[in-house]
Amino acid sequence: MYENRSFSDKTWLVLKGLGMGAANKVPGVSGGVVAFVAGFYEEFIYSLQKVNKKAFKLFIDGRFKSFYRYINGQFLSMLILGMVISYFSISKLLDYLIFHFELYVWSAFFGMIIGSIYFIAKDFGDWNRKYAAYLLCGVIAGLAISFLEPAKENSNLFFVFFCGIISVSGMTLPGFSGSFILILFGNYVLLLVDSVNALFDTFANIIQFDFSWVFNPERIELLKVLTVFSLGSLVGLVSFSHLLAYVLKRFKKATYAVIIGFIAGSLGVVWPWKEKTYILDAVGEIRFDTNGREIISGYNRYFPSAFDTQTVMAIVFIILGALIVLSLDWYDNHKKKQHV
């Protein structure tokens, strides 16, 4: 699992990181699903599990090469590189597509999740009542989260830390969208818009040798919020990986059954036909992000009332989304046959 990789393997890891980064960007879509379908989920979890006391001891003792090998650094660094690149490239393209072709993008995601459910379930093996019960629990949990009403914004630092822990879970738990959870907690704008903008503004001020922001209490508060949120995310990433590694080792099939159910339940989040509800400011007007786009607080879902061209195209994109994921299975089977 932790061997040196070829250049092509490293390239594929970066591309997988791109996929995870793009998925984490969209409310309702989970980077963990990408990891699961692309076949590196377990290695991802077990690599994160290596961030423990022994790893910190190696780092503090200055044994950096040993630290890097111990945490499977080659694998993690390639994935993280892909995620960072995604933030500045693919995720921006995704923002553009959602803004201009929202129905078709959500339709493609819906189809991809349907394909993911088949992809994960096909090798599950025999089902019995116990695993069916785990599956049902996962479906119920996914549906419950999908239809919750968003809360109001809360800048309490303990709550912000908790938001960090929960929001990063989308990377480790397939079907669990961290960005959507932040919308439900009411802190999506505070943590992913306002505080990030404050950080960018601060960097810009420092480059211009302008340190007036030090005397701006609102800016300091937002930077404090972002710092606590980042710490919570780091704690969440490591702690969830340890928990999932434990349950995967001891209850692998039961865990997979819950994950399959959870992904199925999350289909409600990416249902293509829905109307937006928006976050309002103090005077009741719609809030906008730095790109001039309305900030969404949730969705009202509905079934299409007419079988028109738009509806037909949405169905076509659902099928295409499913085929994209299934093509990974066909490609994997083709590679296995070539090596036989």
Image (cartoon, grey):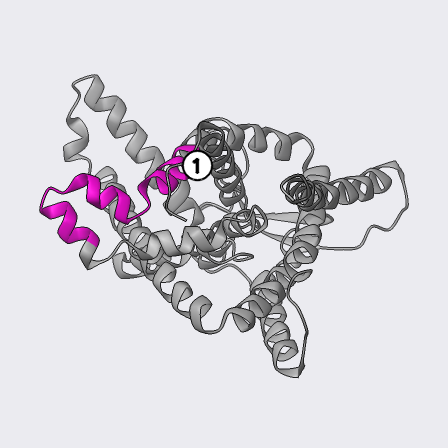
Residue 27, position as x, y percentages in the image: 54, 48
Q: Can you name the residue that lies furthest to the left here?
A: 61
Can see residue 225? no
Q: Is residue 28 left or right of residue 127?
A: left
On whether residue 39 falls in the magenta region, the answer is no
On whether residue 75 falls in the magenta region, the answer is yes
In which image quadrant can residue 334 be found? top right
Q: Quadrant of the C terminus?
A: top right
Q: Residues within 10 Å of mark 1 (few under 14, many from 20)?
A: many
Residue 291 sits above or below residue 269 on the image: above
Q: Can you name the residue that lies furthest to the bottom here?
A: 129
Residue closest to the eye, 41 or 277: 41
Residue 277, position as x, y percentages in the image: 60, 49
Query: Residue drawn at (59%, 49%), measured in percent from left and top?
Result: 37
Query: Residue drawn at (88%, 36%), measured in percent from left and top?
Result: 309
Which element carries disc 1, helix, strand or loop? helix
Q: Is residue 216 left or right of residue 44?
A: left
Residue 238 sits above or below residue 340 on the image: below
Query: Label 1 sits on what residue type?
Result: Met
Residue closest to the eye, 86 or 311: 86
Query: Residue drawn at (49%, 45%), measured in percent from left and top?
Result: 24
The residue that mark 1 highlights is 83
Q: Main secondary structure of the magenta part?
A: helix
Q: Is residue 141 left or right of residue 222?
A: right
Give the magenta-colored segment's residue range: 55-82
Q: Can you name the residue that lies furthest to the top here?
A: 208
Residue closest to the eye, 217 or 190: 190
Residue 215, position as x, y percentages in the image: 14, 34
Residue closest to the eye, 290 or 311: 311
